[in-house]
Amino acid sequence: MEQADVLIVGAGPAGSSCAWKLVRAGLRVAIVDRAVFPRSKPCAGWVTPGVFEALALDPRQYARQCVLEPLSAFLTGLLDGAARRTDFGAAVSYAVRRTEFDHFLLRRSGAAAALGTAVDSLCRGGGRWEVNGRWRAPVLVGAGGHFCPVARHLGARPADEEAVIAQVAEFQMDAGEARVSRAQGECPELYFLPGLDGYGWCVRKGDWLNVGLGSEGGRGRAGHLAALLERLRRTGRLSAARRPSFQGHAYLLRRASRRPAGGAGVLLAGDAAGLAAESSGEGIWPAVASGLQAAQQILDAGGDPEKLRVESYEDELRRRFGPAGDAHGRAPAGWPERQAARLVFSGPSFLLRALLERRFLHAAA
Ligand SMILES: Cc1cc2nc3c(=O)[nH]c(=O)nc-3n(C[C@H](O)[C@H](O)[C@H](O)COP(=O)(O)OP(=O)(O)OC[C@H]3O[C@@H](n4cnc5c(N)ncnc54)[C@H](O)[C@@H]3O)c2cc1C
C-alpha cells in the first residue's frame, strides 16, 4: 500500500492548485487522474488574471512555454442579433489552451502523479482513506470534476442535477484559414442565447480557434450550435470547409449546486463541489481558488483529519462564490431579470461594459 499525507483525485486546475500549495508546505501529496497528461479538456480556456495572481505565476513566464492570448476587448451580442465591441484598452483576461495549461500546472505542483488511473473504489476506516486498494492517506481531496468519484461517494447525483451542458471544438487553423479568419486574438466573441440561459463563443488563440456553446440543461443546443456555426461562417470567422468536431461536458453553476463541501477527512474542490460562476460559467478561477483554500484548511488542521473543519471551508466557499442552490436548485439572485437584461445589448454602451465588468471580469471578488 502506498502512503501519502494527502491524496488528491483529479489533476485539473483544482487538484493541481491544491497539490502545489501542499507540496510547498512539505506534505507528501499523491495526485491520481484517469487521463494521461497532456489531456484534452472541453473548455474555452478563458482565464481571469486572479488565476495567475493566486498561483504566483507570471503570465509572461507561462507564455514562454505555452500559448497565451491576452484579451483586451469583447465582441458581444445576442445569437440572433447584432454584436458590439467593447474595448478595455489593456489585457483584462487571457485565453489558454487547456491541454497545455493543465499539464503545466500539474508539473509545477511537484506532486507525485499517478496518471492513466481511474479511481473506482474508496473507503474510510481507522481514520484513513483507502483508494483503489493501492493508496492510503488520512486526508482526501475530491477534485475529479463534475463526475468526481469522491463527490459521488459523498452523495452527489450528477444525473439528477441541472448542469450547464457545453460543447466545444478547438483546432489549429491551417495557414490559409489563419490568414483570412476575421476572428481576432485580443477580442473573444460571445453570442447570448435568446433566453439568456447560455451563450456561444469564438475565441482565437494564435492559430488556434476555439468555438463552443453552453446552456443550462443543454436546452435546444443542436439548433443554437447550428445557428452559431452559420453565423461564424457568414462573418468570416470560420472557413466554409471546416467541420469542427465537438466534445461535450457538463458542470454546475454554484447556484444550482447542492453538493456538500466535504465530509470526514475529505474536502471537495472545483467542479466536484459545483462552483462555477453565474452568467459567465467561469469555472477555472473557482477551481483554483477552492483548491488553494482546501490546501489551507488541511494545513490549518496540521494534516490531522480530526481537526479538518469542513464547516469553515464551506463558509469560505460561500463567502467567495455566494450561496449554493436552494431547495429547488435555484439561488435567490440569478442573472437579474433575464428579459430586461436583453436590453443591455441594444442600450447605451456603458451598460454592456458594466455587464462585462461585473459578470465576466470579477475574478478577484
Ligand atoms: C465546454 C466548456 C467550456 C468552458 N469554458 C470555460 C472557460 O472559458 N473559462 C472558465 O473559467 N471555465 C470554463 N469552463 C468550466 C471549466 O472548464 C471547469 O470549471 C474547470 O475545468 C474545473 O476544473 P476542475 O479542476 O474542478 O475539474 P477538471 O478540469 O474537470 O479536472 C478534473 C480531472 O479529474 C479527472 N477525473 C475524473 N474522474 C476521475 C476518476 N474517476 N479517477 C481519476 N481521475 C478522474 C479528469 O480526468 C480530470 O483531469 C468550461 C466548461 C466547459 C464544459
Image (cartoon, rainbow, N blue to C red):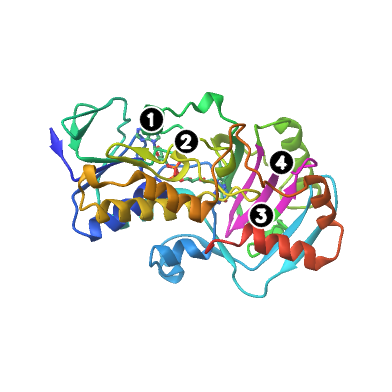
Give the distance between the C-alpha atoms of the residues marked 3 and 2, in whole angstroms.
Answer: 47 Å
The mark that comes first in sequence, 3 or 2, is 3
Mark 4 CB lies closer than 8 A to ligand 1: no
- Relative image position of residue 227 (x, y in whole percent): 78, 39
- Relative image position of residue 75 (x, y in whole percent): 74, 59
Q: Quadrant of the N terminus?
A: top left
Q: Quadrant of the C terminus?
A: bottom right
The mark that comes first in sequence, 1 or 4, is 1
Residue identifier under label 2: 259
Q: Nearer the viewer, mark 4 or mark 2?
A: 2
User: Which residue is pictured at 68% across the width and 49% down the height?
Assistant: 201
The circle drawn on residue 197 is 4
- Relative image position of residue 30 (x, y in whole percent): 23, 44
Q: Nearer the viewer, mark 3 or mark 4?
A: 4
The mark that comes first in sequence, 4 or 2, is 4
Mark 1 CB lies closer than 8 A to ligand 1: no
Label 1 sits on a secondary structure element that is loop
Confirm or deny contact between disc 3 and disc 2 (CB under 8 A).
no
Residue 206 lies in the magenta stretch? yes
Q: Which residues are magenta?
A: 190-215
Tell me which amino acid carries mark 2. Answer: Arg
Give the distance between the C-alpha atoms of the residues marked 1 and 4, in whole angstroms.
Answer: 29 Å
Q: Main secondary structure of the magenta part?
A: strand
Q: Nearer the viewer, mark 1 or mark 4?
A: 1
User: Which residue is pictured at 69% across the width and 45% down the height?
Assistant: 200
Q: Nearer the viewer, residue 198 or 331?
A: 331
Residue identifier under label 3: 176
Tell me if I can see residue 72 in this picture: yes
Label 3 sits on a secondary structure element that is helix
